[in-house]
Amino acid sequence: MPNHRSTQRLISFMAAVILLLIAGTSSAQKTTDKSREPAPEPEQSVTSHQVRIAGQTINYQATAGWLIQKKNNKPVARFGYTAYTREGVENPAERPIMFAFNGGPGSSSIWLHMGILGPERVVITDEGFTPPPGNRVDNAFSIIDVADLVMVDPVGTGFSKPLGKAKGDQFWGVDQDIRSVGDFIKQYITESGRWLSPKFILGESYGGIRGAGLAQYLQSTQGMHLNGLILVSPFFSAISGFDGADIDLPHVLYLPTFAATAWYHDQLTDKPDDLQAFLSEVEQFARSDYAAALMQGFTIPAERKQAIANQLAAYTGTSADYWEKADLRVSHQQFVQELLRDQRQIAGRIDSRFIGPAVNPLSESMDYDPFFPSVGPAFTAAFKDYLYSELEFRPDAEYQVSAFGIDWDWAHTPPGDIGELPFPNLLPDLSMALTTNPNLQLLIQHGYYDLATPFGAMHYDIDHLDIPAAARERVEIAYYESGHMMYLHEPSMRQYRDDLVAFIRKSLAN
């Protein structure tokens, strides 16, 4: 007969076995439950509407929702979009279609969507603060009378997010993003039966990088040629477009926008009447005398440095002493603090027409951009009201307006034998797309008061496209007396639509 100690050991052993059996059963149950989870499905809310554009009533169908993006037949992303297709079209499969997105990286498409392209737009106070809560109206400047429209929200924004075992780093990078958005466009085109439709892509800001990359990616890997590429306030290259890394070139390219900002805020001693002529003069000085002075580095003779500083001060409404102390190199963050410092105000970066009170008048960098609190909440309120009420999408599906905290991979591999670069430069991609697709038309739309992506940098980049002379004839540039989102300025809004519609029709005629 077993003793007391043996009995205890037997009981302990049996308890351990029972616990293991319970754990195994629980684990098996969890595995079974997980295997029974429904696969993610595409979702849509489809509604019908009408809007007056260019003197005619446009009946259209709106579709808000997402597709399921797969790799090796497994879901990797929920990809959100809002599409507008005109009703009553004789052959919808051949109607022009445009895919449009904002930049960031990490921005949803609400800015272009509710600012200019979609059938409704937010009402804002241009150059000033828009009182809450914001409002929206029918958009007579939309382009859905001439082309169907798909507003694209890349992964991490809108309703778009990784699925299953996919991680953010599969989407959050220059090349990863181009592939993901390109694959979405191909999937949408295929599922909607739109392969014979004339195709356009429109990208704003970082959308310049995405748009240029897509033009090359779609035609080189998907056999999809575009009819037109529209880049709004585009950013192409870190070398020309970023003035905070002790590189001389961006200082040359930002100067004309400094001058435009000083001109707008009446900070010039002898303010010229003709803005365009004035900016042409400044750009010529920047590319010649100023660039040559910067090339001398810190060996520039004192008298030469002072002469350049005097001219910089005259063009920018600041002091020669300020430019001398900065060794002729003032970043845009420093400039917006300095220009109106004596008034304890700062100018905007996205749109330098906007001003706001300086949080720290002694600072050499921006505490905030006056543009965003002036218009951002109005855009958010108007869009979410529109999405959940008029487009009838379920309000429990949270729409991510922005995701600027994502860790972005800036490396890029351009076409050719250059190999991977540790920084973005999409000019080789854009050059290849324009060279190998002789029907591809390019429209650049740019505001004079844009300190996020200054027009001087855009000029430099376009001048450095390595393309044949015939391809350069297919490049068109339109300018606006507004900022990064030029369509917030009503005269520019009208011009923006006129330029875009004319470009679409010209592209279709080729």
Image (cartoon, grey):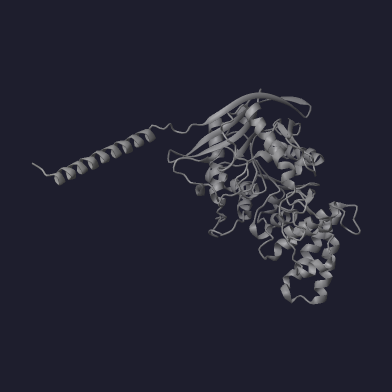
**Is 232 in front, or is 18?**
18
Q: Position of residue 312 (x, y in %)?
A: 82, 64
Instruction: Give the farthest residue toward the left.
Output: 1
- The number of callouts visible is 0
Residue 510 lies left or right of residue 42; in this view the side is right
| On-image quarter of the C terminus | top right
**Is 170 in front, or is 17?**
17
Q: Position of residue 149 (x, y in %)?
A: 65, 34
Residue 155 lies left or right of residue 289; in this view the side is left
Q: Vertically, is 409 above or below 60?
A: below
Q: Position of residue 225 (x, y in %)?
A: 60, 42
Residue 337 sits in which quadrant? Answer: bottom right
| On-image quarter of the N terminus | top left
**Is 110 in front, or is 16?**
16
Q: Position of residue 245 (x, y in %)?
A: 66, 63
Residue 291 lies left or right of residue 44; in this view the side is right
Residue 443 sits in which quadrant? Answer: top right
Q: Is residue 366 visible?
A: yes
Q: Residue at x 53, y 30 (%)?
A: 43
Q: Is residue 509 visible?
A: no
Q: Residue at x 79, y 59 (%)?
A: 338
